[in-house]
Amino acid sequence: MLSGMIATIVPDRGSTTEPPQARLRSVDLAGPPGRLEAVLNEGHPGARFAALVCHPHPLGGGTLHNKVVYHAMKVLNDPAWGFAIPVLRFNFRGAGISLGEHDGQAETGDVLAAMACLENEYNLPLVVCGFSFGAAMALNACCGNSSEGSNVRALAALGLPTEAQGRRYRYSFLASCTIPKFFLSGDGDQFAPAKQLAQVVGSAAEPKRLALIPGADHFFTSHLEPMQQALQQWLKEQLQ
């Protein structure tokens, strides 16, 4: 279902008690190409979920420090948004100090390694979120590998590309993916024209939701807070 920008939401502080000091720590993440650079924003000790956020295309400068990735992490991790769950971010192979070279498809294995790391650390259901290239890799990891998404409670694709540099991206595996999915983009996304994105979402299995933020481009420039508000509202419904 196509929808416009979700109405302004005051961050729900809920009843979650903030830890004395939410810590950021480096993680030794073993990926298929070797060590992948990763950081973990620790969450509330009583968190019921753990989360992963995947960054955009490395060849376009994408890293775990990308602004959209950071702001998505804050929704999941900052108690002010009502969740306070631990969030892992990592650099795909060849980005930052991660070993290996960019491939374009094999990065799905990097996502699976990060998911396994979280499962080993917390043994909790997962929330998986990706932006742009990271969204494509996250979808492929969770939905294109039939047994791998069994522990994923919610899957958010921010700025999922449908067309870039003359190449059309297809996601046929979504037709059989029954994980709750949220597709969130700007209605001016230059890499995902609204009509094309609607076709992708239309072909995906339920449950799913598509939201478009008016006036936002692919990078949610000047629209990061509406992106956060929309993500928060959908997550509140999924993580009850």
Image (cartoon, grey):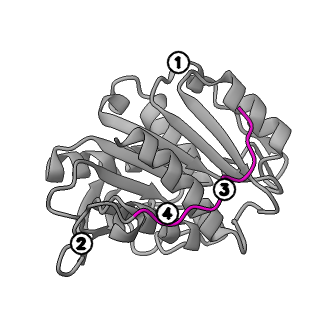
Image quadrant for the N terminus?
A: top right
Q: Nearer the viewer, mark 1 or mark 3?
A: 3
**Vertically, is 205 above or below 225?**
above
Distance in Å between CA atoms under marks 1 and 4 = 26 Å
Which structural element holds mark 1?
helix
Disc nearer the start of the sequence (4/2):
2
**Vertically, is 188 above or below 48?**
below
For disc 3, the neighbor class at 10 Å (few under 14, some 14 to 19, many from 20) is few
Residue wearing tag 3: 7
Q: Residue 21: x percent and y percent?
A: 20, 81
Which structural element holds mark 3?
loop
Distance in Å between CA atoms under marks 1 and 3 = 31 Å
Magenta stretch? 1-12
Amino acid type at mark 3: Ala
Which quarter of the picture shows residue 179? top left
Amino acid type at mark 4: Ala
The residue drawn where x is 85% and y is 47% is 166
Residue wearing tag 4: 72
Which structural element holds mark 4?
helix
Q: Residue 85: x percent and y percent?
A: 29, 59
Residue wearing tag 2: 18
Distance in Å between CA atoms under marks 4 and 2 = 18 Å
Q: Residue 169: x percent and y percent?
A: 72, 38
Disc nearer the start of the sequence (4/3):
3
Disc nearer the start of the sequence (1/3):
3
Distance in Å between CA atoms under marks 4 and 3 = 18 Å
Q: Nearer the viewer, residue 165 or 163?
A: 163
Q: Nearer the viewer, mark 4 or mark 2?
A: 2
Distance in Å between CA atoms under marks 2 and 3 = 26 Å
Residue wearing tag 1: 176
Q: Is residue 18 left or right of residue 187?
A: left
- The secondary structure that dominates the magenta segment is loop
